[in-house]
Image: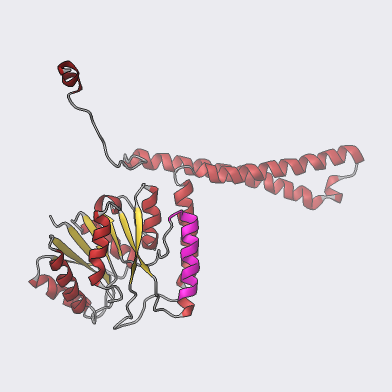
């Protein structure tokens, strides 16, 4: 079994395949430990898969996974992680913007005991229209997730196998892996990396990604705080709505009794608001209860414990030790 696995997703990157493979091979051979390279073709329409196939034919350390269509970077990474066999798994882009020569620095941090090592593009080579939204999104991610790193977006990261296997990846969640890993108690650090100018091709991301990231942030915040207790979120908001509506209805009732004025005629908007608040509160509490049932059903069906064990220590031969003393 290899000690290290390097997972690289490709999508129409035929001009970078051979150069990246040569650099990866040179770096990992100098590391001196067993390794494998997992190349994932994410539905490329150019010569990417053909080149990957040729490389795998001459190097048994290369595993090529071809997806049926373009599923996106998160799904491609998930496919690579599922098939990687190394104890330490590294992920990087296939467009040569990540320098394989920096891999030993990631491995050194893993050897220090960290579970996740994330790259930090200190000097971004992108334009202002990409840097500014990215900086805002990274700041917001750090605040909402509680993980104090500067660059969530880069793919260049290293993981311990037992950590990355516990994280379900779907949608565009690959950029939130450190936040999800922190939920399992993983130790995370960040190292600066060079952001090399793209040698070939063009970026697959645009400014429209900013809006998708915002909604992903809301999802991550919910998953980290309320995934196991959805009633705490919906129930709290529902109770506030019910209390507000009940208080407003009580005030209207008292006003009716004291003044004798018809409530519907004089305060019809407030009467409607009170009713809406009470009904919305009841519905939100109901949603929270349904969410609790879903969580309970999920864990009952999957037989997965809602925690991650770091280590187990068991005392042995305690009686014999006591007798000898």
Q: Compared with residue 53, is residue 164 higher up or lower down, i.e. above or below?
A: above
* 256 on left or right of 247: right
* 282 on left or right of 272: left
Q: Is residue 171 magenta?
A: no
| Foreground of the two, 188 or 225 | 188
| Foreground of the two, 116 or 276 | 116
Q: Compared with residue 106, is residue 208 higher up or lower down, i.e. above or below?
A: below
Which quarter of the rendering shows the C terminus? top left
- How many numbered markers are drawn? 0
* 135 on left or right of 194: right
* 276 on left or right of 114: right
Q: Residue at x 40, y 59 (%)?
A: 176
Q: Compared with residue 314, is residue 180 higher up or lower down, i.e. above or below?
A: below
Asked if one can make out residue 315 in the rendered structure from this viewpoint, the answer is yes
Residue 84 percent coordinates (x, y) = 20, 58
Asked if one can make out residue 67 in the rendered structure from this viewpoint, the answer is no
Span highlighted in magenta in the image: 131-147
Q: Residue at x 17, y 70 (%)?
A: 27
Residue 104 percent coordinates (x, y) = 22, 64
Residue 30 percent coordinates (x, y) = 14, 67
Looking at this view, name the residue that lies furthest to the front. 325
| Foreground of the two, 226 or 91 | 91
Which quarter of the rendering shows the N terminus? bottom left
Residue 205 figure quarter = bottom left
The secondary structure making up most of the magenta span is helix
| Foreground of the two, 275 or 60 | 60
């Amino acid at each position: 079994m290899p000690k290290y696995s390097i997972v690289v997703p490709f999508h129409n990157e035929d001009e970078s395949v051979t150069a990246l493979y040569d650099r990866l091979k040179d770096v990992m051979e100098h590391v001196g430990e067993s390794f494998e390279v997992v190349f994932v073709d994410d539905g490329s329409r150019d010569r990417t898969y053909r080149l990957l196939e040729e490389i795998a034919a001459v190097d048994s350390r290369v595993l090529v996974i071809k997806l049926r269509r373009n599923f996106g970077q998160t799904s491609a990474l998930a496919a690579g992680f599922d098939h990687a066999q190394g104890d330490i798994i590294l992920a990087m882009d296939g467009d040569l913007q990540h320098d394989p020569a920096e891999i030993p620095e990631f491995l050194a941090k893993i050897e220090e005991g960290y579970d996740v090592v994330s790259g930090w593009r200190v000097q971004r080579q992108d334009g202002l229209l990409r840097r500014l939204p990215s900086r805002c999104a990274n700041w917001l991610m750090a605040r909402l997730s509680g993980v104090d790193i500067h660059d969530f977006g880069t793919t260049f990261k290293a993981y311990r196998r037992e950590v990355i296997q516990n994280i379900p990846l779907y949608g565009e969640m690959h950029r939130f892996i450190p936040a999800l890993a922190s939920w399992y108690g993983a130790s995370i650090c960040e190292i600066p990396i060079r952001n090399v100018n793209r040698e070939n091709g063009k970026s697959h991301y645009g400014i429209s990604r900013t809006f998708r990231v915002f909604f992903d942030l809301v999802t991550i915040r919910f998953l980290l705080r309320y995934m196991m207790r959805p009633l705490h979120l919906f129930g709290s908001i529902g109770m506030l709505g019910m209390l507000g509506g009940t208080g407003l209805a009580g005030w209207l009732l008292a006003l009716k009794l004291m003044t004798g004025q018809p409530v519907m005629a004089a305060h019809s908007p407030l009467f409607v608001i009170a009713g809406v608040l009470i009904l919305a509160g009841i519905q939100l509490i109901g949603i929270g209860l349904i969410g609790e049932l879903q969580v309970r059903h999920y864990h009952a069906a999957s037989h997965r414990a809602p925690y991650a064990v770091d280590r187990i220590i068991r005392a042995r031969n305690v009686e014999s030790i006591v007798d000898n003393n």
